[in-house]
Image (cartoon, rainbow, N blue to C red):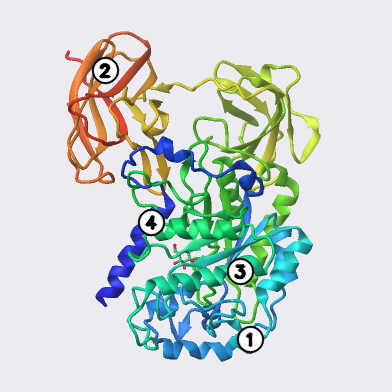
Amino acid sequence: MVAFLLSLLAFLSALADSQSASNGPSPDRSQNEASWPADDRMNWWRDARFGMFIHWGLYSQAAGEWNGKPTSGAGEWLMNDLQIPLSQYDKLVPQFNPVKFDARQWVRLAKDSGMKYIVITTKHHDGFALYPSALTDWCIKSTPFKRDPLKELAEACQAEGLRLCFYHSIMDWHHPDYAPRKSWNDLAKDPPQMDRYVNFMKGQLKELLTGYGPIGLVWFDGQWENTWTYARGADLYSYVRSLQPDVIINNRVSTEQPLKEGQQRLGDYKTPEQSIPPNGFGPGVDWETCMTMNNTWGFKKSDQDWKSTLILVRNLIDCASKGGNYLLNVGPTGEGLIPGASVARLKGIGTWMKANGEAVHGTTASPFPRTLSWGRCTKNINGNTTRLFLHVFEWPGDGQLRVPGLQNLKDNAATAYLLANPRQPLATETDENGATISLPRSAPDKMSSTVVLQFEGAPQILPALIAQKRDGSVVLSAGEARLHGGTFQYESGGQLDNIGYWTTPEDWADWEFKVTRPGEFTVSASIAAPASGDFEISIGGQTLLCAAPNTGSYTSFASVKLGVVKITTKGNAVLAVQPVKDGWQPMNLRSVHLEPIASRP
Ligand code: FHN
């Protein structure tokens, strides 16, 4: 039981890792950015924006139940969660005979929903290979299903113009040489030999990357146990790259723990799971959110908790608006059928994509500094022509859509129209606060309606200054800071919403904000730091010498009062946070707050 709890803890901590940049400061992230992938390898994937994840294997036959007892967890974790001895789990082998599997039907369903790539589990954590491997009998050739579903999918993807991609689990609950060995592995006798397991895994990867034509990407997973080291990950990354030089490899090829001196971040893109990072990961960082339609990856007949098509469409838009991809999962049954509820949603997404796909495919992140209140924005820049796609979730009741800060529509050559009705230009007005677009009374699509703005040149967006709230207070958040320096950065994703990697005192941050109600203010800040360090806050010629609290870690934030400042005039003010060179210690800064002190009568 202890081993199970330890592996669960390891899994959860790594899950956080794979969903976000590691919290601890890395020695020199700017140097590591150079290791980010070559554009020519990534471009098809960046343009795709939308893919299908398929979790299909022996566990699908069990459908999330064992001896009539439903598992509490995901369908593909059945063996682990119910601690099923391998000598019993393998009774699924003679039962697995997906005679209703139709690769072309699956690929067409993905294509018609607007997906451009398919990532299928070649082997999940249970170690069962979904193709006839020459290296083990623990694979599909031992079942009554004497076909090769990966081969059939490769042919179907080739025919339909989609990229076939392979998921492959590093963790293997079945192989006798994988360590740590699970307590329910009652078939393995000798002590595990991890090096021998790695050679076996490389052998299977060679079968997969030389036997099925060009593979779009390898989606590694199960990288969180302590036997999987940075060095093993680096070696595996190089090995896979040697088999197919253009294949994309995700970041789960290695645990993304705080990098040590001289280590480069591994993997071509980040893989947040079941959540969409609030602000993406900033320019230059590729990422993809993978998500289930219900709550399980592998088929589980009792899980009927399905997300609506509206939510799935808006998730896809949300990812694209932040420069990321959406990998949406289906869990086919043991018969080889994609569940009807999944098919219905994919068809609904396909209907929306048929009318709006150009506002997702081939787009890049929103140029606006903050998320738009009524929806999202994606952009496509082609030469000197910019098209902004405004995805309107909440149609304005007064028919006036306000686009904060945008100045480009002043240009007479600029045009605005509904993607659903491109021949009908929309009237626009522009002032120093931005543009207003007059829309028809009703939205073309309740899920999301696309307004297109087309103009020459790059987007020109006046920064919407941070303003005092009605109560006179001011919140200066990490996402709105102006960062001065090359190492620290704004971190977002999952629980992250802070300035991090603040490892050098040369880096400093400031905020410009609008003062309409001068006065005295108490200054406080939300900080997380494993050691207390010194910094200064300056505004309007005043300087506060501050000490960061030691909160024990980079993720446990505490609010700390730092002193009082006076703002004497209306207009724009600038508050700066600067490390004190000698007393500085790395810290994560979430926000700075100014609370007005009631003026004495
Ligand atoms: O444990 C797996 C899980 O079964 C599923 O495959 C997901 C998909 O991203 N990955 C791991 C959990 O992070």
Labelled disc at residue 230? 4
| Residue corresponding to mark 3 | 208
Give the Cα distance between marks 2 and 3.
59 Å
Disc 1 secondary structure class: loop
Which residue appears at 61% of the width and 42% of the height? 39
The relative height of residue 229 versus residue 337 in the rendered view (above or below) is above
SS label for mark 2: strand
Tell me the amino acid under the disc marked 3: Leu
The amino acid pointed to by label 4 is Tyr
**Mark 2 or 3, closer to the camera:** 3
Residue 196 figure quarter: bottom left
- Mark 3 or mark 1, whichever is nearer to me: 3
Query: In the displayed structure, would residue 387 be above or below residue 558?
Result: above
Residue at x-position 55% and y-position 82%: 61
Specify few, some or many for label 1: CA neighbours under 10 Å numbering under 14, 14-19, or 20 or more: many
Q: Along the polypeptide, which appears first: circle 3 or circle 4? A: 3
Q: Earlier in the sequence, mark 4 or mark 1?
A: 1
Neighbor class of circle 2 (other Cα within 10 Å; few <14, some 14-19, many 20+) is some
Of residues 130 and 114, the one drawn nearer to the viewer in this rendering: 130
Amino acid at the residue labelled 1:
Asn
Under circle 4, the secondary element is helix
Cα distance, mark 4 to mark 1? 38 Å
**What secondary structure is found at the residue carrying circle 3?**
helix
Q: Earlier in the sequence, mark 2 or mark 3?
A: 3
Whether residue 81 is visible: yes
Relative to 195, 337 lies left or right: right
